[in-house]
Amino acid sequence: NAPEGKVPVTKVTSGGWIYDSKTGRMMFETYVHMDEEMVTDGHHMHTDIIISDDGGKTWYLGDTLPCRVCTEGYIGNLDYPAYALSYNDGIELSTNDGKGPNVDFVFPLGARYDNIGSFASRIAYSRDGGDTWFYSETPITYPSLYGLEGGCSEGWIMERADGVLALHVRCQDESTTN
């Protein structure tokens, strides 16, 4: 069930959580297949932020991030959509005020960015208490000759005591293994 006037959540896959300690809002980042008739190979997905404002009793669609996560480094067909997903939870930042201009929350995302299966890392962030979300301006890439999930993914993020964000990502290139 969704609160009145909100879009209900119909499908959830893996993703990560954020809890707003100031409001009690719960947010979950998940990737969703855009068309049930499409092959579920990750080529037709988008990233949703689903929200509960009542302790998890009801959930609704908060925001949807676009499929086209990265166009940098695309080889060949630019009509082949990318997608983003997270294997880890996001974090509430010490600057959270729910009204901007400060960033309140961040999710680390592994983003598919070429048509051979390579990944880059990006950050999804919100400045308004989780109502709207954006991708970081620049993807973090690692050269991958063979695709197949090479590159940067499976990010984990933390805020240091001085307010600097530290991102740790898994970087891999299948061409370097025997």
Image (cartoon, helix red, strand yellow):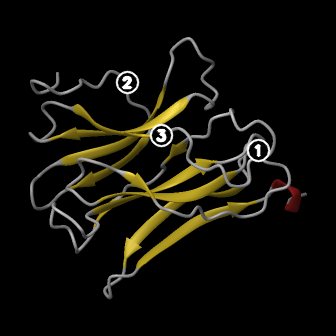
Label of residue 33 in the image:
none
Q: Quadrant of residue 135?
A: bottom left
For discs 3 and 1, the disc positioned in front in the rendered view: 3
Q: Position of residue 3 (x, y in %)?
A: 11, 27
Q: Amino acid at mark 2?
A: Lys
> How many residues crowd around disc 2 within 10 Å: few (fewer than 14), some, or many (20 or more)?
few
Residue at the spot of label 3: 66
Could you say which is closer to the camera, residue 138 or residue 154?
Answer: 138
Q: In this rendering, would 27 be left or right of 99? A: right
Q: Which residue is mark 1?
A: 148
Distance from disc 3 to disc 1, alpha carbons, whole Å, reads 22 Å
Mark 1 vs mark 2, CA separation in Å: 26 Å
Q: Position of residue 67 (x, y in %)?
A: 53, 38
Q: Position of residue 8 (x, y in %)?
A: 24, 23
> Which residue is located at x 53 percent, y 70 percent?
168
> Seen in the image, is 113 located left or right of residue 12?
right
Residue that protrudes farthest toward the bottom in the picture: 162
Q: Earlier in the sequence, mark 3 or mark 1?
A: 3
Mark 3 residue type? Pro
Closer to viewer: mark 3 or mark 2: 3
Residue picked out by circle 2: 11
Pointer 3 or 2: first along the chain: 2
Q: Pointer 3 and pointer 2: residues touching (CB < 8 Å)?
A: no
Q: Is residue 40 above or below residue 112?
A: above
Crowd band around label 3 with a 10 angstrom C-alpha radius: few (<14), some (14–19), many (20+) = some
Which quarter of the image is occupied by the N terminus?
top left
Q: Is residue 74 above or below residue 57?
A: below
Neighbourhood count class around disc 1 (C-alpha, 10 Å): few under 14, some 14–19, many 20 upward:
some
What's under tag 1, amino acid-wise?
Leu
Give me the residue at 60% from left, 23% from top. Answer: 40
